[in-house]
């Protein structure tokens, strides 16, 4: 008998993602993004995102079915992001998924977005090692997780105490006059900059901070330090060396993230590190993580960029794994939860 066919829906932020997987085989991963609508505001506007999801939902589902060469009636279960995310945006995905599940008479899994970011790597690199450490870094999250079992047991070790990693990239890009979302532009500018030109602060790395925030990160001090540095250069009539600032800022972020992730692996005696989220596309992060993992005998798993950023395939991947492991589906009455804890992988 062939493995179950799962349709996954993701609407936690500004991407309407619909993915279709059979077992751990990816059949379709369609995305409509409203990022261009938010660009002039320098950040995602929740109400604008919700409306865009409404408009994109049906065409994106149709496109995914076409790509996977399946009919909706062939689907064995629906999975949808229940949280965490923007409240209104989540509602659109959950309502759509419930309507499909009801109409098709199929089970529904309301799943955790962070667990889905972890599980997606199974589509590319096979079953996850148990346990793994996962570092999720995007515009919305910076989480360090201990993952003994992605279907039922995830422990939050640390998170950002202020801005998310991607948010810091986006805000610094704005200060440097680069477009939104700023991460890829900083990455590119940094290629020809000197990462040691400016010694920007490494947040929460002093012994005193580590005692309380060993696996937490903070980027707001770094962001302010960059803004002050740029202001001072401008005030003194100097040309701002955008590439050097970008490289030095990026180095500070990458240094802290990789140090904390490796520390988490060593502390918990885990030999696999998985990195996900939009910031995992960062070329310097990939390089330094690769070097530091190799130094400590840790195997590094990073899904390809298209699977790191928010997408529907990751939700389908988690739904598929939940089904394979015989976990209970959600009741049709489950609610979306904008602050869903990572300890809850699937809504009851
Ligand atoms: O996962 P994602 O698509 O959406 C969420 O925020 O959930 O992540 C988008 C974030 C943005 O902040 C963007 O600037 C950042 O990921 N990003 C990058 C790179 N590509 C995207 N940050 C650093 N370097 C990159 N190459
Ligand atoms: Zn995400």
Image: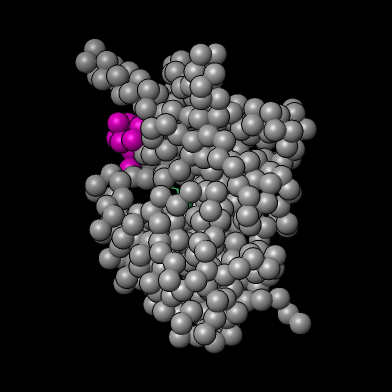
Camera-side residue of 80 and 342: 342
Residue name at image x 56 percent, y 56 percent: 345
Is residue 8 within the magenta segment? no
* Place of residue 262 in the rendered image (x, y in percent of width and height, measured from the top left): 65, 30
- Image quadrant holding the N terminus, namely bottom right
Camera-side residue of 5 and 227: 5
Camera-side residue of 305 and 323: 323
* Quadrant housing residue 242: top left
Residue 238 versus residue 38 in the image, above or below: above
> Where on the image, by quarter, is ligand 1?
top left
Residue name at image x 73 percent, y 80 percent: 2
Residue 131 versus residue 57 in the image, above or below: above
* Place of residue 122 in the rendered image (x, y in percent of width and height, measured from the top left): 67, 58
Residue 189 versus residue 89 in the image, above or below: above
Residue 179 shows in this picture: yes
* Quadrant housing residue 75: bottom right
* Place of residue 105 in the rendered image (x, y in percent of width and height, measured from the top left): 52, 85
Residue name at image x 44 percent, y 67 percent: 334
* Quadrant housing residue 317: bottom right
Residue 318 relative to residue 230: left or right: right
Camera-side residue of 348 and 305: 348
Q: What is the basis of the colouring in this image?
A: one colour
Residue 303 shows in this picture: no
Number of labels in the image equals: 0
* Place of residue 184 in the rendered image (x, y in percent of width and height, measured from the top left): 45, 42
Residue stretch in magenta: 171-179
Residue name at image x 22 percent, y 15 percent: 235
Residue 107 versus residue 140 in the image, above or below: below
């Amino acid at each position: 008998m062939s493995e179950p066919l799962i349709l996954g829906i993701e609407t936690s932020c500004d991407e309407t993602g619909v993915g279709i997987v059979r077992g751990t085989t990816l059949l379709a991963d369609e995305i409509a993004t409203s990022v261009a609508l938010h660009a002039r505001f320098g950040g995602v506007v929740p109400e604008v995102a919700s409306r865009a999801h409404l408009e994109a939902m049906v065409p994106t589902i149709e496109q995914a079915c076409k790509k996977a060469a399946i009919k909706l009636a062939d689907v064995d279960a629906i999975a949808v992001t229940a949280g965490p995310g923007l409240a209104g945006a989540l509602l659109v995905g959950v309502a759509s998924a419930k309507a499909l599940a009801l109409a098709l008479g199929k089970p529904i899994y309301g799943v955790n977005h962070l667990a889905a970011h972890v599980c997606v790597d199974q589509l590319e690199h096979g079953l996850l090692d148990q346990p793994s450490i996962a570092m999720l870094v995007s515009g919305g999250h910076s989480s360090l997780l201990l993952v003994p079992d992605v279907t039922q047991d995830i422990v939050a070790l640390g998170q950002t105490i202020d801005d998310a990693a991607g948010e810091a990239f986006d805000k610094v890009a704005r200060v440097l006059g680069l477009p939104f979302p700023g991460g890829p532009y900083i990455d590119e500018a940094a290629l020809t900059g000197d990462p040691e030109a400016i010694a920007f602060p490494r947040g929460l790395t002093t012994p005193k901070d580590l005692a309380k925030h060993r696996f937490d990160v903070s980027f707001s001090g770094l962001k302010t330090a960059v803004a002050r540095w740029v202001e001072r250069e401008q005030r003194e009539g100097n040309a701002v060396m955008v590439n050097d600032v970008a490289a030095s800022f990026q180095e500070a972020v990458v240094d802290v993230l990789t140090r904390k992730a490796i520390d988490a692996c060593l502390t918990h005696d885990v030999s696999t590190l998985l990195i996900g989220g939009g910031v995992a596309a960062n070329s310097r992060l990939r390089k330094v993580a690769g070097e530091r993992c190799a130094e400590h005998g840790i195997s590094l798993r990073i899904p390809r960029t298209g699977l790191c950023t928010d997408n529907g395939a990751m939700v389908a991947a988690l739904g598929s794994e939940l089904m394979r492991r015989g976990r209970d589906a959600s009741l049709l009455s489950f609610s979306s939860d904008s602050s869903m804890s990572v300890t809850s992988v699937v809504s009851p």
